Amino acid sequence: MKPTRRSLLLTPALLASPALAQGSWPRRPITFIAPAAPGGATDILARVMAQTMQATLGQPVVVENRGGAAGVIATEAIAAAQPDGHTIGIGMISTLAVNPHVYRMRADVMKDFAHIGMIAKVPMVLLAQHNLAEGGLAGFIARVRAAPDTITYGSAGAGSNVHIGMIAFLEAAGLKMVHVPYRGSGPMVIDLVAGNIQSGMTGTPAALPVLRAGRVAALGTTAKARLAQTPDIPAISETIPDFEAMQWYGIVAPGRTPPEVVAKLAEATNAALANPEVLARLADEGALPSPMSPDVFRGFVAAELDRWGAVARRNNLRPNE
C-alpha cells in the first residue's frame, strides 16, 4: 500500500516514541554509573546488582565508575543521558539528598531522574581511639562535652554520607567537634588507626576489618537496633533515643525514561534483592536490603532531601569544610 503524506509525517514520531522504544528494550548493553572509585561500598553494590540484573534483562549491565566532585559528576551524567533505559546509576543519600544543598548542581534530583528503587540501607559506625572509648558512648559524649571544639573526627569528605551522619549525631548529642575531611573512608580509617585523628564515622564495610583487628573502638551504630553482624556494638539509639542516620543506595535513570522501562528496571532490581546470593553478599557488607517500588522510592528521596537539607542549612554546610 502506498504510504500517505500523513503516514510519512507520523513515522519519525513513532520511531522516537517511548512506546516503540520500550517494545524492544533493552536493545544493547546497559551502562550502570557508579559515583565512586572502584572497590568501595558504592562500587561493590553496583557490581552485585549489575551481575544479577543482567540475567533478568537479557543484556549485559556494565558498571562505569565516575568518581570525583562528591558524586556530582556522575549524578549529572545520569541525568543528561538519553532517557531510553540504557543508562542507569546509583543514587544515594549524599548525591540525592545532601549534594543539592551543598554544591551547585545542574540536575534537579526530583525532576531530572526516574526513581527506580532502593537497593539497601547501610548503617554507619562511630569509631574512636581506645582512650576515648572508656565508658562507652556515654563516656565519649562526656569527654567531648567537657572539651568542645578540641576533639577531632574524620569523615569521607564534606557532605559525604558519613559526614552528614556525624553532624546528625553531634546535633542530637549537643556536641561540638573539629571536622577533618578526607577523600574517602579508606584514608580516614587509616589515619584513625594511626592516631592522627581521634574519632570518625564510616559505613560498616570500612569499619568491620579494623574492628575485628582491635585497632580502634566502636562506640555505636547509626541503625535503630543492634546489627546481626555486630551484636556486641550498641546502637546509638540506646543512649540517644530514636536516633537513626543510615546511608542508603538506590537506582535512578534519566528523567523521561518511559514508564514501561522504569517498571522493568524496578522488576529486575527487586528480583535481584530476592536472590539468595545477592542477599548473602549484602549481609557480608553490613547492608540491609530495602526493596521499594518506584513511587515509594521517589517519596523516600523527597523526604530525605527535606531532612538533610534542614541539617545542612542549620550547620551552614559548605564544600571542603
Image: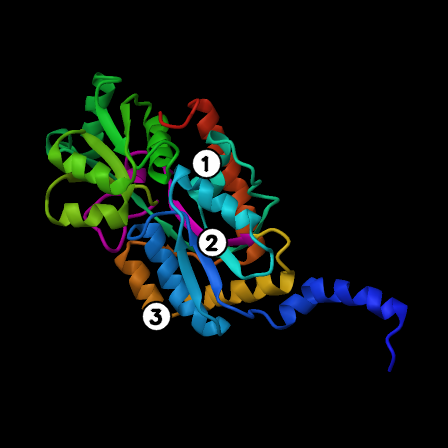
Q: Is residue 23 visible?
A: yes
Estimate the x, y position of residue 94 in percent, counting from the top left: 42, 40
Give the CA separation, mark 2 to mark 1: 17 Å
User: What amino acid type should be assigned to the residue bearing mark 3?
Assistant: Pro
Query: Contact, CB < 8 Å: mark 3 with mark 2?
Result: no
Is 165 situated above or below 85?
above
The residue depicted at 24 percent of the width and 47 percent of the height is 206
Which span of residues is magenta-colored? Answer: 224-253
Q: Is residue 273 visible?
A: no
Where disc 2 sits, the SS reads: strand
Q: Residues within 10 Å of mark 1 (few under 14, many from 20)?
A: many
Dominant secondary-structure state across the stretch colored magenta: loop
Query: Contact, CB < 8 Å: mark 2 with mark 1?
Result: no
Estimate the x, y position of residue 289 in percent, counting from the top left: 39, 58
User: What amino acid type should be assigned to the residue bearing mark 2?
Assistant: Gly
Q: Earlier in the sequence, mark 3 or mark 2?
A: 2
The residue depicted at 55 percent of the width and 42 percent of the height is 109
Give the CA separation, mark 1 to mark 3: 32 Å
Task: Indicate yes or no whether the magenta region holds residue 245.
Answer: yes
In the rendered view, does 169 fall on the left or right side of 93? left
Q: Quadrant of the C terminus?
A: top left
Q: Which residue is mark 3?
A: 276
User: What amino acid type should be assigned to the residue bearing mark 1?
Assistant: Val
Q: Which residue is mark 1?
A: 98
